[in-house]
Amino acid sequence: MPIANVNGTELNYRDAGTGNKDVLLLLHAFPLNSGMWQRQIAALEGRWRIVAPDYRGLGQSTPRGEASTMQVLAEDVRALLAHLRVERAAVAGLSMGGYLSFELYRQIPGFFRGLALCDTKAAADTDEGKAGREKFAKTALEKGLGWVADEMVPKLLRPDPDPAVVKEVRDLIRRGTPAGVAAAQRGMAQRPDSTPTLAKITCPTLVIVGEEDSLTPPAESEKMAKAVKGAKLVKLKKAGHLANLEATEGFNRALQTFLDGLPA
Ligand code: MLT
């Protein structure tokens, strides 16, 4: 994977389908990395150039700082996009990638050709949620990535997951660092409420959710789809939070149809 030295850190990223001029930016979930998008990249790289970073401290990117706030991660992504000379793109973010998409939209709305909000939500954390993230961060630093995988996998997948997908997700989690996981939790705890952002989104928007998503349940997606003007909602059967991995065919079809329909 290529590395870019940007914004005071080293970011690993995927850059697939480089001959194409239409760009799709893929923003991953916590505590994973750009490897979670491999099936989407395989399906779309014939038509799209796909840029997918590993956030600092996750995947192969170096950990930096105590808290990976959405502002810091948005600066990283913007610096990477400048480095790659990408000025406009369709953006798809899953869960934490959705939180980051909201921050990017607030900063650079004109960058967005379209937005796919996947298994995510607009609301900020409750005080209880923030305290839970701090506890998670401390325990991750103490116990390491095996513990992180044990904690997260049941939440990320449907109740009766495919063992091959369980293995894939555990392997993705193990590619990060405890420091990066802790910083991501602390950063997500600080994210603002993005509900007011929803009404300001003017680019074409797709909302996708797994019907069995327990982390960001379908009700959250229904709210987002109602609040964004003209947004389309797709619910996928037999999928939990990582709908792109558990209902790959339906997810890819929905994303591809959405991307094909985007105005130039
Ligand atoms: C994610 O999938 O990115 C996270 O689980 C989201 C969260 O912790 O809020």
Image: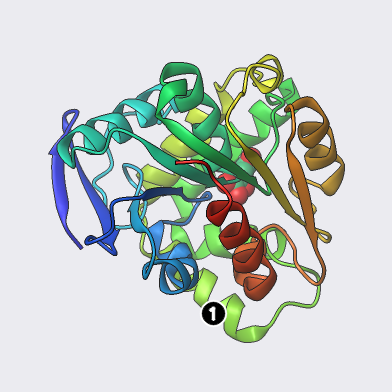
Beta carbon of the mark 1 residue lies under 8 A of ligand 1: no
Give the percent coordinates (x, y) of residue 138: 50, 39
Quarter placement of the N terminus: bottom left
Q: Quadrant of ligand 1?
A: top right
Relative to residue 9, is residue 151 drawn left or right? right
In which quadrant will I find the C terminus?
A: top left
Q: Position of residue 249 (x, y in %)?
A: 64, 75
- Colour mode of the rendering: rainbow
For residue 143, above or below residue 68:
below
- Is the residue marked by circle 1 packed among few (<14), some (14-19), or many (20+) residues within 10 Å? few
Residue 116, percent across and down? 59, 45
Q: Which residue is mark 1?
A: 167
* Near-viewer residue (82 or 168): 82
In this view, the residue in front, 68 or 37, is 37
Amino acid at circle 1 = Lys
Question: In the image, what residue occupies the spot 33% across and 45% down?
Answer: 57
Q: Position of residue 3 (x, y in %)?
A: 15, 52
Left or right: 75 in relation to 230 = left
Nearest the viewer among 52 and 22 is 22
Is 241 on the left-hand or right-hand side of 3? right
